[in-house]
Image (cartoon, rainbow, N blue to C red):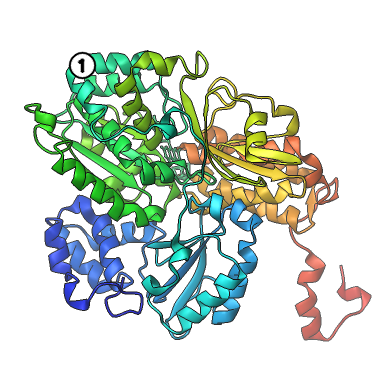
Amino acid sequence: MCPNSPTSTTPAAAAPDLPQLLARYQAEPHALLQILREWQGLQGWLSPEALNQIASALGLTLAQVQGVAGFYRFLHTQPVGIYRVLFSDNVTDRMLGSAALLADLCQRLGVTPGQVSFDGLVSVDQTSCTGLCDQGPAVLINHHQVVTRLDAARVAQMAELIRARVPVPQWPAAWFEVQDNIRRADVLLAAPCAAGAALAPTLARGADATLVEIKRSNLRGRGGAGFATGLKWELCRKALGAEHVVVCNADEGEPGTFKDRVLLTRQADAVFEGMTIAAHVLGARRGFLYLRGEYRYLLEHLQAVLQRRRAAGLLGANILGSAGFDFDIAIHVGAGAYVCGEESALIESLEGKRGTPRIRPPFPAERGYLGYPTLVNNVETFCAVAHIAQHGGAGWAGIGTAKSTGTKIHSVSGDCARPGLYEYPLGTRVSRILADCGARDTQAVQVGGASGVCLAPDEFECRIAFEDVPTAGAFMVFDRSRDMFEVARGFARFFAHESCGFCTPCRVGTALLVKRMDKLAGGHGSRDDLDVLFELDHLLHSTTHCGLGASACNALRDTVLKFRPAYEQRLRSLDFEPGFDLDAELSIARRMTGRDDAGAHL
Ligand SMILES: Cc1cc2nc3c(=O)[nH]c(=O)nc-3n(C[C@H](O)[C@H](O)[C@H](O)COP(=O)(O)O)c2cc1C
Ligand code: SF4
């Protein structure tokens, strides 16, 4: 935050200057992203002088620093408004009226979306899902604070507060309340692991026996891919390297997913405990929690939990008196890039670079952060690890199905009476979750986020499990009033926006998808366009470099197959139809030549 801006909470004298900030990070090139983020927090934006100074202090070229600053959506290399309002743009925010609220705020402040007001006071724009779908519409203020449950009254008051330059900390406190909305708790949410409760039995059992216990549980990763956790730990443990590194993936960028937000809020001890147990098994000394930029507001809370754990001997040197067991955790804050949830892109980002996914193999478990064997697990996976280390693997294996053991936490949002978190044993039917959350007249459920699967009513008896419908946790409900074409179009825009641009099929393919969908929306579609959507699906699925491109077409494919009338009602003809109206395009020429006779029309 700018020390002299009305949004500042920091007296100008307390703010460090750039050399002090660089010294705090020991001019370490791998800290580049953190340095850029923090300096921008103080100055509002990253000026060319600052980029130059940072480059020379870190021994990097200016191009390298500019390349990183230009990659992340929350970093600005041009002046921005003193107040920066970013509307969350998930489909669930739109269903709650976010588009009209954005237009209202822009009109009240006299700004165009995406541009800074002429006096430099404010900018209003959109950003991808902020992970607050159970209490939207949501906005991010200055990338630092979140306002939930936005409505017309709040928008009107917000415009007044901004015009009067009232500092954000003086805005109504109720606006910043983020509710946990736990609606159904099972073993993880009902009885979170207390600080040290799983570490003590781990140390008593020893590293080998703890790994056996994790394997006995049959736990599979909760970040999406469902890789066997015990096997991943074993591979990483066996990999050769001067040291091993443990990383918690708290990027949670999948639209409709917000369970990690609640786990970090309520069960940070369990997350850190799971990471510390992994460190004990692997012999790791360093850990990172990669926190998505949208959850920056959780940073102070998480730092306080880490500090408490250090004071209690649960982190640092000789943990719980165990000679030689030294491990500590640093928090790295992201800056608005969904692709950084992909584990190799996340590691690039941890190293201070652009979040471009790496070529694999080698996998991070063999060669990850700075080339060291690196274990990456999801927030919920580490909570499950803490539970298993405390209660034993057999208990976890006894919950759920044979192939999908334990419980899964679902982030439920959309058309239902009770959005929030629901924890069930794996193997629970979709219909049960719909009944519990108070969904009515449901037309579709998008399970697993934008990259997941869209289920129609005849599939609601499916089970959420790796062998049936796998999920990373999002459960978005759409009733019969919703237009499934528009839902899919929103997801197409999301992927085009978030593509990192590294490989052509994804960079171009996602843009072409949006063009086709826009053409259909504009009433110029034909059956040919639907065929092209399937061709693009095949292209993206088979040729892209990482999972983002491979899954970018999932929602489109599912909705065309299962909700075809939503597409067909937009087709003008069954034959080829051009993407624009040539006759309409000639209207300017007609006006200029003063002609409007039949010969001037096509
Ligand atoms: C585009 C993309 C985004 C991803 N985002 C996340 C994420 O936000 N959180 C997460 O845990 N895993 C995410 N993943 C999966 C990770 O690459 C990785 O598989 C996971 O963190 C491993 O943890 P787990 O074994 O505990 O599931 C993403 C994958 C892709 C391709
Ligand atoms: S598939 Fe997309 S997000 Fe993944 S590397 Fe290629 S361009 Fe980047």
Residue found 55% across the figure and 49% down from its top: 134
Residue nearest the viewer, comparing 344 with 467: 467
> If the image is split into quadrants, where does the N terminus sit?
bottom left
> If the image is split into quadrants, where does the C terminus sit?
bottom right
Rendered location of residue 319, percent (x, y):
13, 32
Residue found 7% across the figure and 28% down from its top: 324
Q: Point out the residue furthest to the right here.
A: 598
Residue type of the residue flagged with mark 1: Arg
Q: Is residue 135 left or right of residue 50?
A: right
Q: Is residue 25 left or right of residue 363?
A: left
Q: How many marks?
A: 1
Q: In the picture, residue 314 is in which quadrant?
A: top left
Rendered location of residue 302, percent (x, y):
29, 48
* Residue 551 shows in this picture: yes
Q: Secondary structure at mark 1?
A: helix
Q: In the picture, residue 206 is in which quadrant?
A: top left
Residue nearest the viewer, comparing 15 with 303: 303
Residue 176 drawn above or below residue 449: below
Mark 1 and ligand 1: say if the CB distance to the nearest ligand atom is below 8 Å: no
Q: Is residue 51 left or right of residue 552?
A: left
Residue neighbourhood size for the residue with mark 1, other residues' Cα within 10 Å, grouped as few (<14), some (14–19), many (≥20): some
Residue 401 drawn above or below residue 284: above
Residue nearest the viewer, comparing 374 with 185: 185
* Residue 80 shows in this picture: no
Residue nearest the viewer, comparing 409 with 339: 409
Rendered location of residue 478, percent (x, y):
69, 44
Residue that numbered label 1 is attached to: 205
Residue found 32% across the figure and 37% down from its top: 271
Residue found 69% across the figure and 25% down from its top: 461
